[in-house]
Amino acid sequence: MAGLSMASSLLPLSSSLSIASRGSSFSCPGSLSFPTPSPASKQRGALTIRCVRVGGVEIPNNKRVEFSLRYIHGIGRVRARQILCDLSLENKVTKDLSDEELISLRDEVSKYMIEGDLKRFNRLAIERLKEIRCYRGIRHEMGLPCRGQRTKNNCRTLKGKKVSVAGKKKASR
């Protein structure tokens, strides 16, 4: 009990936390306690957690490959499915992939324009439109939509926050 009073005097406690002392648990009413891993469940040897890096991006381990590939800029739903079909790869959880499957997946993804190359390509295309002063380039410079959307009411994302104009009043009927 002396350990409990000493611990409570050193650490601020919330009603949602519980204190564990030498295997016995003391908790406040309405508390939340987290299970501690038992020594039998610990694995010895190699680490089980690993980051899968494909195309310069760390993709999540706990999702299926089709959904994990979407974390790469330039790979969407259709392209992810196409990659899996080209490799005839089973759509399993990413952490369950073997080393050979990972190598073939990396090789297949590297065939596409992704991440930095794709962003650079798009930026240069927009710069070219601005240089030749075409309609789309001018709209990009002005920060307005360039695909034919109406601008009277919407397009707040591109135009920015609404600015009131001084001296402008509504016409009375």
Image (spheres, rainbow, N blue to C red):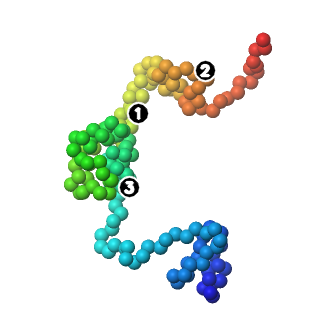
Mark 2: give few (<14), some (14-19) or many (20+) Cα within 10 Å: few
Q: Which of 91/166 is in front? A: 91
Residue 172 in the image, given as x and y percentages of width and height: 78, 14
The x and y percentages for residue 124 are 38, 31
The residue furthest top is 173
Instruction: State the mark number for residue 62.
Output: 3
Label disc, if present, on residue 123 of the rendered structure: 1
Q: Which residue has dot 2 on it?
A: 152
Left or right of 3, for residue 148? left
- Quarter of the figure with the N terminus: bottom right
Q: Report which quarter residue 85 is drawn in.
A: top left
Report the front residue among 154 and 116. 154
Q: Kindly identify the amino acid type of the residue bearing the numbered disc 2.
A: Lys
When the figure is inspected, residue 126 is found, relative to residue 87, above or below; the finding is: above
> Which-is-in-front pick, marks 1 and 2?
2
Give amino acid for label 1. Arg
Label 3 packing within 10 angstroms: few (<14), some (14-19), many (20+): few
**Dot 2: what SS?**
loop
Mark positioned earlier in the residue sequence (3 or 2): 3
Distance in Å between CA atoms under marks 3 and 2: 45 Å
Q: Are marks 1 and 3 in contact (CB under 8 Å)?
A: no
Mark 3 falls on what kind of element?
A: loop
Q: Residue at x 27, y 41 (%)?
A: 83
Q: State the separation of the CA atoms marked 1 and 2.
A: 28 Å
Residue 131 to residue 107: above or below: above
Q: Earlier in the sequence, mark 1 or mark 2?
A: 1
Quadrant, the C terminus = top right
